Image (cartoon, helix red, strand yellow):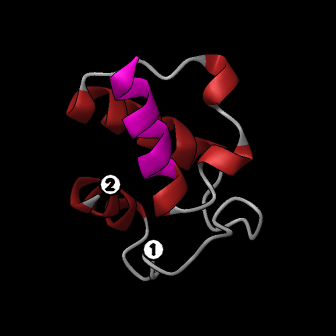
Amino acid sequence: MDTILEILRGLHPDIDFESCDSLVDDKIIDSFDIVSIISDLNDEFDITIPAEEIVPENFNSAKAIYAMVERLMEE
């Protein structure tokens, strides 16, 4: 989880990512941020995020991103 928070803080250091659960819905992160996050997650966790996983629900919070990463690492 710490790695994911670091990735997110690198994009927007002023946001409290530990408590925010509407990153996409409130337009805190945009599509460019998501592309950057996906790239960082792929490198950091050695996973590939398939297109069907790139939905707002998976990027609305650090917890949601963490859950997606865990799920993909198990596959």
Work out which residue is located at the far front of the displayed protein and give it: 74
Can residue 32 be seen here?
yes
Which quadrant is home to the N terminus? bottom left
How far apart, in angstroms, are the residues tagged by discs 1 and 2? 10 Å
| Residue 36 visible at all | no
Mark 2 falls on what kind of element?
helix
Residue at x-position 61% and y-position 45% = 58
Residue 10 locus on image (x, y percent): 31, 62
Task: Identify residue for label 1.
Answer: 17
Crowding at mark 1 (Cα within 10 Å: few <14, some 14-19, many 20+): many
Looking at the image, tell me whether mark 1 or mark 2 is earlier in sequence order.
2
Who is closer to the viewer here, 4 or 70? 70
Judged left or right of residue 13, residue 61 is right
**Up/down of 75 relative to 36, above or below:** above
Q: What segment carries the magenta color?
A: 65-75
Q: Which mark is residue 57?
A: none
Q: Is residue 10 left or right of residue 33?
A: left
Up-down relation of residue 70 to residue 12 (above or below): above
Residue 3 coordinates in the image, percent (x, y): 23, 54
| Residue 35, placed above or below residue 24 | above
Viewed as shown, does residue 19 lie left or right of 13?
right
| Image coordinates for residue 65, horizontal then vertical, percent | 48, 49
Q: Residue at x 41, y 18 (%)?
A: 48
Residue type highlighted by circle 2: Ile
SS label for mark 1: loop
**Quarter of the C terminus within the rendering:** top left
In reply to whether residue 73 is colored magenta, the answer given is yes
Label 1 sits on what residue type? Phe
> Label for residue 4?
2
Give the class, few, some or many, for how many residues have Cα within 10 Å of label 2's Cα (few <14, many ≥20).
Answer: many
Would you say 31 lies left or right of 2 here?
Answer: right
